Structure formats: structure tokens, C-alpha cells
Amino acid sequence: MPRRTLKNADPSIPGSPRYRFHRASGQAVVTLSGRDTYCGPYGSVESAERYRAAVSEWVARGRRAPEAAALPLSVNELVLGYLEWADGYYRDPAGGANQRELWHVKRALRPLKENFGRTAARDFGPCKLEVIREGLIAAGLCRGVVNKYTNRIRHAFKWGTARELVPSAVWHALSAFENLKRGRSDAPEPEPIRAVPDGMVDAIKPHVGRQVWGLIELQRYTGCRPGEAVLLRAVDLDTSGPVWLYRPAHHKTAYRGKDRVIALGPRAQAVVREFLKPDVGAYLFSPADADREHRDALHARRKTPLSCGNRPGTHRKARPEKSPGERYTSSSYRRAISVACYKAFPVPADLTGADAKQWRRDHEWHPNQLRHSFATHVRRDFGLDAAQVALGHSSADVTQIYAEKNLALAAQVALKIG
């Protein structure tokens, strides 16, 4: 039957099906799981109430038809519904989908689908979760990652329990499943993140662009997170005092209602001034700017006359698959440092195989280590409380992870007392 589609839907239910006009009968109709449900005379109060009731019941059943809801929900169906929810729930600091977290969620749920996808969700329990965990350990994942992945699997069943898709007994049983303890499993322990020596940082300067080096210097002088550094804009800066204050528009703990203020001293201010732009809403550290400067530098070194060969801007793809973005991401920033480490610390010719890989691991660092270095220096010179405030931590216990203990002080105590 021909229908006239109107842009009417229940705004309280994201992605709800449309409230439409059925021309042949004059009734309101909504399609749920491929089947039409008639709600009464189109435009009437009764039809609107029936529409909302039908859609609400359909959503409560996990967006499944009544006949399908009568069948036991499979693990595959639970995972599909959970992934749809996670796609709208997990957001990055800029407000878009958090692709990194979604990647980890999908990777954690992959062995669940492969091993027990067709199993009824109500029949899943700790013994089956143990099978998945043993597979993760056999794959070589460290203890922390294994615990995080099993927690994500449990969270999927918690999500299903909250929506009455899975019996609460399943969630209670999975809650009793304990995480791996240090030294009590075959899973390898993760290596602790250490502060990076200044010499290793300075060594990569010739191998990174001006923008990446600016990010490195900003982290060195402020201890901010990589995700906070790449989001810096002039509009987020308060330059009224001798110490500038940077309030990131988005940060790691914003969803908890916490404020984040980063203090910029004279050296950090000098770094930022170099990248200030007339547009206060533009990101200061931009890959597009870096690409433009790189091309200008190549053109300045050009020896071929302009009348010969390619002219600037002509030898480019009309529709490139990927263009430089307006700002760095935490991942692209880390990759730039990784490539620079590869160039700055070439593997000696006499090292091969496992020895070469170990050399590479020993001579590569990542942006989070700059935060650890900053925390260690602040704790050594100003104490733990100052490090806690500078890093923006709510608890000193978290700061202990970042700020390495001052062993020199312990040595002084040992010389006097020990």
C-alpha cells in the first residue's frame, strides 16, 4: 500500500521508528521489526498514545518483535544490541565516537561471539567466561588487558540485565567471577610506565615537525595529558595573569563533572605563542599546517626552474583517500614520536632477531612518559601534594603511579640512620 511518510517520531526514544499516515485506511502506522502496527485514526490523541506504547514495548524487548522476543536471546543478539548502545555512549574528548574504546570493546567481545555466539544468553556463566579468559591468556595478553576485556564482557551482560534481556541471575553469577591477581596466574605482567630521560626526548627533535615538537615541549612544561595537549585552542586560554590558565573544552574526567585547569608558566607560554592564530577557535597544533610547511620547505629547496617540471600544487590527487586533519589525535601524535624514535635510534648492525627487537623497545618512548617525567620532577622539588594538583588528580594514590619515589631522599636517611 502506498504511504505518505511524515517526520514524526518519539523524541524521547533515540532512533525510534516514524509515526506515518496509511493512506488506504486513514490510520496511523508504525513499522516495528518489519511488521506494521496500526494505531488508530491518524493525528488523533489515541493514535499518538498507542504509537508511543508500541514503540516503548518494542524497545524494552530489545527492538525485537513479540514472536522473536518469545525465543531465548542469543549471545550474538545481546552483543549486537550492546554494540549499538556503545556506539552512542562512548565519546571522545571532541564529542565524536570514541573509536579507540569501541575498538577495545569489539575486540573483547570477539571471542565471546566466536565461542558462544549461538548460546542462549541466559545459559552463559562463569565457567564459559573462564574459557574465554584462558584463550586471552594463551594469546599472550598481559594480566591487566585480560582483566579489562573480561570486565567488558561482564558489562555487556550487565547492560542486558538492566534492560530485562538477560535474567539477573546471570549477572550475579558473573559478578562473582574474580579478576586475575598479580603473581597468581600465567598471564604476563605489564611493564610499568617510566619517566623518559631528557636525552631521549631531545634526540628526536630533528626528526619531528615543528608542531609535534611544540606538543612535546608543552607536555614537558605542564604535565598535561596527550589528549589535552592536542586540543589546545586560544579560546580556551586565560592570559590575563602572569600564569596562563588552560581549560580544555573536553578532558578525560569531564563526564564525572570535574573541572580541569592546566597552568602555563613562562616556558610553556613561549611555546604556545609560537602557534597562536588569528582564529581563536582554531587548533594550535595542526597536521594541515605541518603539511603546508613541509611543502613550502621542499619548494624553497627546489633547484629545477619553475618553467620546467611540476609547478607547486599541480602534482596532487584530486580526491586523496586521506588529507591532513585540523588537529592531531592522541594516536597520530604517538605515531609521529614512534617514527622519530625509529629514525633517531637506528638498530646497530650487529644486533639481529630478538636482540634487535629489544633494542627497539629500549629506545622508543610515548607521550604519556612525558607526563610521568613531569610528575617525578614536581614531586622531587615540591612534594606529592604539588604533583597531585599539577596533574589534576583527585587522589594522591593515583599520583603515586605517575610520580616515581625520590630514592635520593631514602639514601640520605640510610646514610644518617641505617
Image (tube, rainbow, N blue to C red):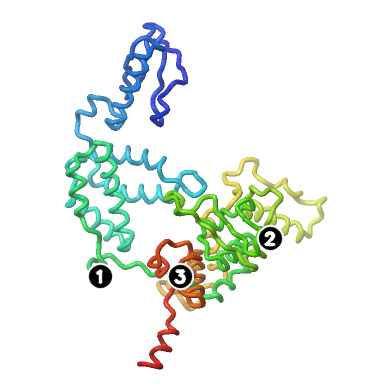
Look at discs 1 and 2 and give the one toward the viewer: 2
Which kind of residue does numbered mark 2 sit on? Arg
Percent coordinates x, y for residue 71 in the rendering? 19, 30
Q: Which residue is drawn at 47% across and 21% down?
A: 7
Q: What element carries label 2?
A: helix
Q: Left or right of 151: which side holds 392?
A: right
Question: Is residue 287 visible in the rendered structure shown here?
Answer: no
Q: Earlier in the sequence, mark 1 or mark 2?
A: 1
Residue occupying the point 43% across, 89% down: 412
Neighbourhood count class around disc 1 (C-alpha, 10 Å): few under 14, some 14–19, many 20 upward:
few
Q: Which of 120 and 411 is in front in this view?
A: 411
User: Residue beneath label 2, please?
Assistant: 273
Is label 1 in a helix, a strand or a loop? loop
Q: Residues within 10 Å of mark 2 (few under 14, many from 20)?
A: few
Residue under the point 25% across and 56% down:
135
Q: Mark 1 points at which residue?
A: 183
Residue at mark 3 to residue at mark 2: CA–CA distance: 30 Å
- For this view, does 367 lie left or right of residue 240? left
Question: Which SS class for mark 3?
Answer: helix
Mark whose residue sits in front, 3 or 1: 3
For residue 60, which quarter of the picture? top left
Which label's residue is closer to the chain start, 3 or 1?
Answer: 1
Image quadrant where residue 215 sits: bottom right
Residue 163 visible in the picture? yes
The residue carrying mark 3 is 385
| Amino acid type assigned to the residue bearing label 3 in the image | Asp
Residue 234, percent across and down?
64, 53
